[in-house]
Amino acid sequence: MAFVIPEALKHITNPLMLGIMRSVVTTDELSAMIPIETSSGTGFKVDREGTLPDTAFLADAGTGVAESSGTDDRFEVQFRRIVGDLDIDQLVSAADGSDAATRNRLIGKKAKKTWRIVQDKLVNGGHTTGHTFAPTRSDITAITKYSAHLDSARRGPGSVKVTVNSAGTDADFQFRAPGDVAYGAAVNSIADGDITLHSHNPSFFITATIDISAATASGESLIYFTSSNNEFDGLWEMCDPSLITPPAGNGTAFDLGMLDDLMDVQKVRENRVFVMNGKLVNKFFAANRALGGIDPQHITIPGYGGTVPTYRGVPVLTNDYLASYTQGSGTVSDIALVSLNPDEGCVLVAQTGGSPFTPDADPRTRSVLGFRIEDVGPLETTDAHRTRVKWVGAPVLKSELACAIYQGVIQT
């Protein structure tokens, strides 16, 4: 069962957990609406729809029925940990334990900071930051895009296979992701440039820059994906590249037609929301005023404490964790349309202590909605008492059709 935070807050009865959740309910519109699921273990398994079975009209004789079955693409999203220690000087502790209120207040602050990291990485997180080949390859000069969930630390290396058809002029490239069973479809390259290689499970891919003149011999190389951080993959990493409109030139001026285009290509059409930063929301209002002073319809988000505008009935959410960046001579940002449908859209999966969320759960004894509070105890070299606050989980995009992004929209 999936909860949104404001709804979960209604059911919590444990005093410490209630204080934590009240601390994390902020004015972030996306985190107020995203469904939260719970799962035990170290990750969350996702079955994406692969191929559909065939059916056909049948002759009156009723003969010639063909059999076929559909397929699913299964992968596991690995949970990540956000952890911080909190030391309270023993001088503030009274013999009767009256420091509990102080401790709980500081735990709430620590949890609030932890949740802000979750909010940030929900859109910006990117676990894979580099790679190495063994043996090295000269025909792949760079990888410009990594899909989500390429994890050599937990699944071992992947591999790239090159089959040269005509040395220096024509070669087929294939990719196998860490933990995957086989190579994906071969992509033929006859010129320098970028190609996208999907693994046997098409949810895993890389975009590689090819130097075709260096493709002189067939062979295979292991590829080890590396990370300079420990964060999970966010929405921008999980979005399928075929549903991303890349930036152009010095950026593209905001136009309401961009929102129409996103609504056309994004196919999971339940619980959809637009996500953009505040400057682009201002552009959205300006575009509406240019139509003759039209004020877009607003709706109320439960638990948010305010209203949000809509476009064609879809909420337009402000998320200022979406960074601005330079595109040519322009300062730009991105717009996403994402489904928050619990069955097929983007959800936040939190680790739980082996059983579903219960209202009276105590985070000091097991994980609750991803949060766990651990009493580390008195420190040996300092007269202080340490408490550890952590959150364990990761965002999940259940369908590759649930997200579409328009990149490089001019905001200034």
Image: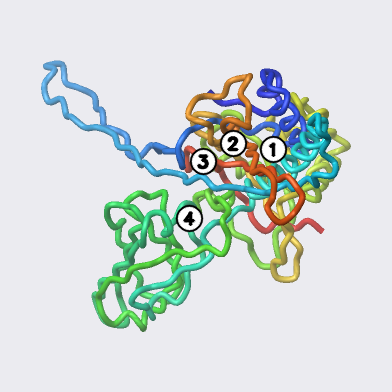
Report the front residue among 96 and 254. 96
Q: Residue at x 72, y 40 (%)?
A: 111
- How far apart in space, not on screen, are marks 2 and 4 (Cα)? 25 Å
Vertical arrangement, residue 240 with respect to residue 32, above or below: below
| Amino acid type at image mark 1 | Leu
Q: Position of residue 250 (x, y in %)?
A: 71, 67
User: In the rendered image, which residue does mark 3 sit on?
Assistant: 397
Are the residues tagged 4 and 1 within 8 Å (C-beta)? no
User: In the rendered image, which residue does mark 1 sit on?
Assistant: 30
Side (left or right) of 120 relative to 175: right
Residue 147: mark = 4
Q: Position of residue 102 (x, y in %)?
A: 82, 36
User: Residue 228 occupies which quadrant of the picture?
Assistant: bottom right
What kind of element bears circle 1? helix
Of label 2 and label 4, which has the lower sequence position?
4
Q: Position of residue 208 (x, y in %)?
A: 44, 68
What kind of element bears circle 3? strand
User: Residue 377 occupies which quadrant of the picture?
Assistant: top right
Are the residues tagged 2 and 4 within 8 Å (C-beta)? no
Vertical arrangement, residue 248 with respect to residue 362, above or below: below
Bin the neighbour count of mark 4 within 10 Å (Cα to Cα): few under 14, some 14-19, many 20 and up: many
Report the front residue among 349 and 341. 349
Of label 1 and label 3, which has the lower sequence position?
1
Are the residues tagged 3 and 2 within 8 Å (C-beta)? no
